[in-house]
Amino acid sequence: MKVQRKLIPLCLILLATEMGIEILNEEQYGELQTLGQFDLKTSSWIKTLYDIRKLGGAIFCDRRYNTVFLYHNGAESYYAARGFRGVLRF
């Protein structure tokens, strides 16, 4: 799916749905980090609460200095090294 750079974070839920996965939430992202060290040079958008999204915000995480960090940014922000992680349920 090719979308304008500015719209990428806004389309993640749609893209994840089309892929048949759910975007990780904060708790799931933390659990993922117990399985290995992910996002050492990148970051991942995570599922953001509706109250934050309706104000234009979005949440992302990464791992630096052996610590998992949670950040916020405008949902329209674009970074080439930021993707998302998902879970497949079956």
Image (cartoon, helix red, strand yellow):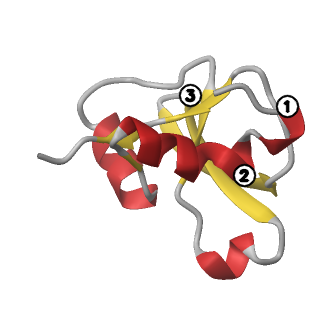
Q: Residue at x 60, y 45 (%)?
A: 12
Looking at the rendered structure, the secondary structure element under dot 1 is helix
Q: Amino acid at mark 2?
A: Leu
Q: Position of residue 17 (x, y in %)?
A: 43, 48
Regarding residue 16, the answer to whether it shows in the image is yes
- Per the rendering, the mark at residue 65 is 3
Spot the residue most to the left: 90
Q: Residue at x 85, y 33 (%)?
A: 4
Q: Residue at x 44, y 41 (%)?
A: 18
Question: Depth check: 34 or 75 in front?
Answer: 75
Looking at the rendered structure, the secondary structure element under dot 3 is loop
Q: Amino acid at mark 1?
A: Arg
Q: Whole-Å distance between the Cαs marked 3 and 1?
A: 29 Å
Q: Whole-Å distance between the Cαs marked 2 and 3?
A: 29 Å
In the displayed structure, does residue 83 sit left or right of residue 25?
Answer: right
Regarding residue 69, the answer to whether it shows in the image is no
The residue pinned by badge 2 equals 10
Q: Is residue 53 above or below residue 18?
A: below
In the displayed structure, does residue 34 sit left or right of residue 14?
Answer: left
Assess disc 3: are there few (<14), some (14-19) or many (≥20) residues with their C-alpha within 10 Å of its C-alpha. few
Question: Depth check: 82 or 39 in front?
Answer: 82
Q: Earlier in the sequence, mark 3 or mark 1?
A: 1
